[in-house]
C-alpha cells in the first residue's frame, strides 16, 4: 500500500458518512439456553430483519437513557526493577454490562426485573386481578439478548445489533411512582460466556444500506 501523500485535507482520513446514530431501537430477550443461537439478523437478500419468534421484545424503553453497553477489561501487569512502566501486560478478563429502562408493564418485564417465573400466573376475567409474590431469594435466571438499533431509512437503512447469548440481571433501579414519570423498570444485565455458542457477545452490521461501497469505506475486504 502506497504512503499517504498530500495536504492535510488529503491525508486526514475523515469520513462523516461513517458516523452512525441509533435513531430507533428494539430490545429482545429469550430463554437461555433453549432459544436458538443468532447467526444472522437479515433474510437472504439482506433487506428484512429475521428474528426467531421465541425472542420477545421488552417494548418501549427510556428515550433519555437508551441502551448502555459498558465493556470493562482487567489486566495483569508485570513490573521490573528500574522500569517505571510495566514491562508486560496481559488481559485476564473482558466483561460487558448492558443497561436499559423498560417503560411497559407486562409479564416479560416483570419477570426480568423481579427475577421470577410468571408462567403459572393466570387471569380470571370475573376477578380482573393477577397477583404474584416477590421471592426472598430470586433464582438465577439467564436470558439470550438481541439488541437492534437502526440508522437511516428505506434503502439506506443500517442495522447495528449486539447478540449476547447468556445474560443475567446483576442490578435493578428503584421504581418511582409520581405524577410526572411512568412506572419504569431499569435493569443492568451482565453478559457471561456461553461455551456452546463460543462467545459472550456477537456484533452485526447489516441491512440494505450496508453496500459494498460502504464496507470498502469501512476498510473491510469484500469476499471474492
Image (cartoon, rainbow, N blue to C red):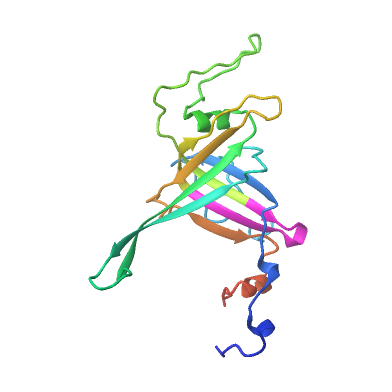
Q: Nearer the viewer, residue 41 or 58?
A: 58
Q: Is residue 42 above or below residue 124?
A: below
Q: Is residue 69 above or below residue 30?
A: below
Magenta region includes residue 18:
no
Quadrant in the picture for residue 138: top left
Q: Nearer the viewer, residue 222 or 27?
A: 27
Please tell me which residue is depicted at 52% across the width and 46% down the height of the picture: 98
Magenta region includes residue 159:
yes
* Magenta stretch bounds: 149-164
Please tell me which residue is depicted at 73% across the width and 58% down the height of the picture: 152
Q: Is residue 99 left or right of residue 126?
A: left
Please tell me which residue is depicted at 40% across the width and 30% down the height of the picture: 139
At which x and y percent is residue 115?
47, 30
Quadrant in the picture for residue 74: bottom left
Residue extending furthest right?
154
At which x and y percent is residue 2?
57, 90
Q: State whether residue 221 appears in this view.
A: yes
Amino acid at each position: 500500500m502506497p504512503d499517504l501523500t498530500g495536504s492535510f485535507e488529503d491525508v486526514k482520513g475523515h469520513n462523516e458518512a461513517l458516523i452512525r446514530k441509533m435513531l430507533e431501537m428494539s430490545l429482545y430477550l429469550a430463554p437461555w439456553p433453549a432459544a436458538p443461537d443468532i447467526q444472522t439478523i437479515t433474510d437472504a437478500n439482506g433487506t428484512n430483519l429475521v428474528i426467531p419468534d421465541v425472542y420477545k421484545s421488552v417494548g418501549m424503553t427510556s428515550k433519555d437513557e437508551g441502551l448502555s453497553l459498558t465493556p470493562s477489561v482487567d489486566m495483569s501487569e508485570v513490573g521490573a526493577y528500574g522500569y517505571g512502566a510495566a514491562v508486560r501486560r496481559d488481559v485476564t478478563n473482558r466483561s460487558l454490562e448492558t443497561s436499559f429502562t423498560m417503560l411497559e408493564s407486562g409479564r416479560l418485564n416483570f419477570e426480568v426485573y423481579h427475577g421470577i417465573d410468571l408462567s403459572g400466573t393466570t387471569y380470571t376475567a370475573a376477578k380482573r386481578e393477577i397477583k404474584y409474590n416477590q421471592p426472598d431469594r430470586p433464582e438465577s435466571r439467564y436470558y439470550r439478548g438481541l439488541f437492534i438499533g437502526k440508522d437511516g431509512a428505506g434503502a439506506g437503512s443500517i442495522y447495528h445489533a449486539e447478540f449476547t447469548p447468556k445474560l443475567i440481571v446483576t442490578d435493578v433501579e428503584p421504581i418511582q411512582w409520581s405524577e410526572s414519570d411512568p412506572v419504569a423498570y431499569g435493569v443492568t444485565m451482565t453478559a457471561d460466556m456461553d461455551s456452546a455458542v463460543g462467545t459472550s457477545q456477537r456484533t452485526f452490521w447489516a441491512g440494505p444500506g450496508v453496500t459494498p461501497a460502504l464496507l470498502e469505506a469501512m476498510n473491510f475486504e469484500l469476499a471474492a
